[in-house]
Image (cartoon, rainbow, N blue to C red):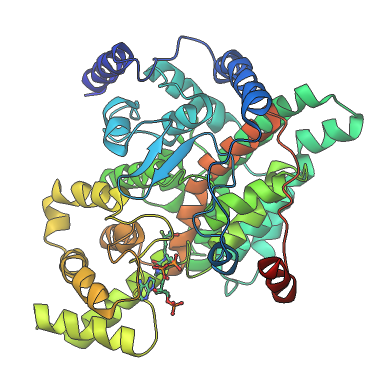
C-alpha cells in the first residue's frame, strides 16, 4: 500500500507541476528547502513595498471597526488563503489536492502532519522520503524535559486540559533557541533559523505534552508510552493517548490534524500567535497565547460544545429521531438565546470543505455509518441550515468543521470531549508556527493597528 500511495503521490505531484501549479520538492532537507525558497519571497516583499505600497485593496468602514474587524484585508499570511465560497487552500492547493499528493505514513492512507507542515512551510510537496525524515527528526526531539512533566503532573486534574496545554507550551520556552540567540545579539537575517528550530521542537513535543494531559486527567492508572522513533507525529500521539492499536482512529487523527493545520491568519488563534510573535516573543510563548484564544467557545472550544449539544439532543429525542424532532431541538436552542455550535463562520459562506472531507472519511467506513451519534450529526447537518436561514441572523448557516470533528473521536472511544480542543491545539501549531518562521524570514514588523474611542470615531465621521 505504501509503495502504491508513494508512487501516486509522486505522479500526481509531477502532473500538478506540469500545470505550473506546484513543484515536487527535491531531495533537500526542510531547512535547505526553506533556504532555497526564502530569497524569492523576500524579493517579492521588497517589490510589493517598493512598487505598490500606496495601492488601495479595500476600505475601512465603521462596520468593520464595530464588527470585530470582520473582512478587513489587513494581514500578511503566507501558507493559506481562505475563500468565502470554496474554503481553504494551502499554497493554492485544496484539501482534495492535498489528500492526493501529500505522502501518508508507512502503511497508512491519510496525509501526515509532517507532509502538511512541509507544504505549509515551503510551498512544496515533500517526497515520501522527506516526509519520513521529518517524522524521524520530530520523533528524535519528542520527549518532554523533566521540569515540564513535573509541572503538568502537579496540576489539578480538574484544570481544563486547554489551560494545562497552554501552560506546558509556555514553560517550554525555558529552552528557546531563539530567545537565547536574541540575548546573545544575533543579526535579523538569522532570526528565522532559530525560530524554525524552536517551532520544530515545539511541534515535536506537542504529542507527548497533550497525551500526558489526557493520561493525567482521564486515565491516571495508565502508564504512558514513550516516543517511538519509528512512528510519525500523529502515530506517536495516538499511541501515547492509548489508541495505538486503533488504526482507524489513528488515520482519522492524521486527516483531522493535517487539514486543521492552518486556516489563514485572521482567525483568533492564528492571529494571536502572529500578534504576540510580532513583538519577537519566542514561538513557545507566542503559541501558548494562541492556545488561550483557541480555548474560547466561539472558536476551538466549539468542537467540545458540538458533542455536548448533540448528546443532549440525543438524550432528549431518545430513539424517536425524526426530522421534526431535530428541527424542534434546533429551534429550542435558538429560542433560548444560544448559538448552534458547529454552524456559522466568520469568513466562510458555504459548507466548510474540512467538514466535507471528514464526512467523506465517515462514508468510507461502515462502522462509522452505523454509529448513532454520527448519524445524528449527519441528519442535523441536513436540517440545521434551513432552520438557521429561517432564524435569519447567521450569515453562514452551513456546518463548519467542528460540526463533525468530535463525533468520530467519540465513536472510536476517545469520549472525553473536554479534551477535543487540545487535539485542535496540536494541529493548529502547524500553521501558526509556520507563519512565525515566515514573519522572521521576511522581517515583518511589530503589529500595531490604530484604535479609536466612540467619541473619536464620531469626530472622524463628522470631519
Ligand atoms: N447559531 C446561532 N446564531 C448564530 C450562529 C449559530 N451557529 N452563528 C452566528 N449566529 C448569530 C451571531 O451570534 C450573530 O448574532 P448577533 O447579531 O445577535 O450578535 C449573528 O448570527 C451574525 O453572526 P455572523 O456574522 O454570521 O457570525 P460571526 O462572524 O459573528 O461569528 C461564529 C462566527 C463562528 C463565531 C458564529 O457563527 C458562531 O457563534 N458559531 C457557533 C460556534 C462555532 O461553531 N464556532 C466554531 C467556528 C469554527 F470555525 C472554529 O473556529 N473552529
On the image, the x and y values in percent for residue 288 come to 65, 54
Residue located at (70% from left, 56% from top): 150
State the image quarter where residue 112 is shown.
top left
Q: Quadrant of ligand 1?
A: bottom left
Q: Quadrant of the N terminus?
A: top left
Q: Is residue 227 above or below residue 409?
A: above
**x and y percentages locating residue 145 in the rendered image:** 70, 44
Residue 261 quadrant: top left
133 lies above or below 296: above
Q: Is residue 107 above or below residue 359?
A: above
Residue 447 locus on image (x, y percent): 72, 47
Which of the 4 image quarters holds residue 348?
bottom left
Compared across the picture, whether 202 is left or right of 1 comes to right
- Residue sitting at x 73%, y 76%: 455
Can residue 224 be seen here? The reply is no
Direction right: furthest residue = 184
Query: x, y percentage for residue 356?
Result: 24, 50
- How many marks on residues? 0
Instruction: Please state if 48 lies on the left or on the right of 359 as rendered.
Output: right
Q: Give the left or right position of residue 312, taking residue 364 as reference.
A: right
Which residue is at the front of the view, 179 or 57?
57
Q: Is residue 188 above or below residue 423?
A: above
Residue at image x 28%, y 29%? 107
Res 462 seen here:
yes
Furthest toward the front, the residue is: 463
Residue occupying image coordinates x 29% and y 11%? 18
Amino acid at each position: 500500500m505504501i509503495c502504491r500511495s508513494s508512487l501516486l503521490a509522486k505522479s500526481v505531484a509531477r502532473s500538478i507541476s506540469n500545470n505550473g501549479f506546484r513543484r515536487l520538492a527535491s531531495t533537500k532537507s526542510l531547512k535547505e528547502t526553506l533556504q532555497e525558497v526564502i530569497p524569492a519571497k523576500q524579493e517579492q516583499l521588497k517589490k510589493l513595498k517598493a512598487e505598490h505600497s500606496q495601492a488601495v485593496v479595500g476600505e475601512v468602514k465603521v462596520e468593520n471597526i464595530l464588527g470585530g474587524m470582520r473582512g478587513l484585508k489587513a494581514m500578511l499570511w503566507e501558507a493559506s488563503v481562505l475563500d468565502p465560497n470554496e474554503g481553504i487552500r494551502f499554497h493554492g492547493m485544496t484539501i482534495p489536492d492535498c489528500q492526493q499528493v501529500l505522502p501518508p505514513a508507512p502503511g497508512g492512507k491519510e496525509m501526515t502532519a509532517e507532509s502538511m507542515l512541509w507544504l505549509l512551510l515551503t510551498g512544496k510537496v515533500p517526497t515520501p522520503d522527506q516526509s519520513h525524515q521529518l517524522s524521524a527528526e520530530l520523533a528524535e526531539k519528542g520527549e518532554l524535559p523533566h521540569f515540564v512533566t513535573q509541572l503538568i503532573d502537579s496540576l489539578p486534574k480538574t484544570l481544563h486540559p486547554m489551560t494545562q496545554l497552554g501552560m506546558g507550551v509556555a514553560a517550554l520556552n525555558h529552552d528557546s533557541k531563539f530567545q537565547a540567540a536574541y540575548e546573545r545579539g544575533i543579526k535579523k537575517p538569522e532570526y528565522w533559523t532559530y525560530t524554525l528550530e524552536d517551532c520544530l521542537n515545539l511541534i515535536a513535543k506537542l504529542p507527548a505534552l497533550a497525551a500526558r494531559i489526557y493520561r493525567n486527567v482521564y486515565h491516571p492508572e495508565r502508564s504512558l508510552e514513550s516516543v517511538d522513533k519509528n512512528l510519525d507525529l500523529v502515530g506517536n500521539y495516538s499511541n501515547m493517548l492509548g489508541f495505538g492499536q486503533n488504526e482507524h482512529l489513528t488515520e482519522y487523527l492524521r486527516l483531522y490534524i493535517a487539514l486543521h493545520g492552518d486556516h489563514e491568519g485572521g482567525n483568533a488563534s492564528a492571529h494571536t500567535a502572529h500578534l504576540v510573535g510580532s513583538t519577537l516573543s519566542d514561538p513557545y510563548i507566542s503559541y501558548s497565547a494562541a492556545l488561550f484564544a483557541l480555548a474560547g467557545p466561539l472558536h476551538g472550544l466549539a468542537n467540545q460544545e458540538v458533542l455536548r449539544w448533540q448528546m443532549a439532543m440525543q438524550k432528549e429525542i431518545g430513539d424517536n429521531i425524526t426530522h421534526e424532532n431535530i428541527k424542534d431541538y434546533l429551534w429550542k436552542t435558538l429560542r433560548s438565546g444560544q448559538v448552534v455550535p458547529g454552524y456559522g463562520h466568520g469568513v466562510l459562506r458555504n459548507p466548510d470543505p474540512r467538514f466535507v472531507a471528514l464526512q467523506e472519511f465517515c462514508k468510507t467506513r461502515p462502522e462509522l455509518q452505523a454509529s448513532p451519534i454520527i448519524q445524528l450529526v449527519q441528519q442535523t447537518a441536513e436540517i440545521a441550515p434551513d432552520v438557521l436561514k429561517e432564524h435569519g441572523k447567521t450569515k453562514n448557516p452551513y456546518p463548519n468543521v467542528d460540526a463533525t470533528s468530535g463525533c468520530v473521536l467519540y465513536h472510536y472511544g476517545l469520549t472525553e470531549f473536554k479534551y477535543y480542543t487540545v487535539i485542535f491545539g496540536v494541529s493548529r501549531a502547524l500553521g501558526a508556527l509556520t507563519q512565525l518562521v515566515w514573519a522572521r524570514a521576511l522581517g515583518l514588523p511589530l503589529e500595531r493597528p490604530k484604535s479609536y474611542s466612540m467619541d473619536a470615531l464620531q469626530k472622524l465621521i463628522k470631519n
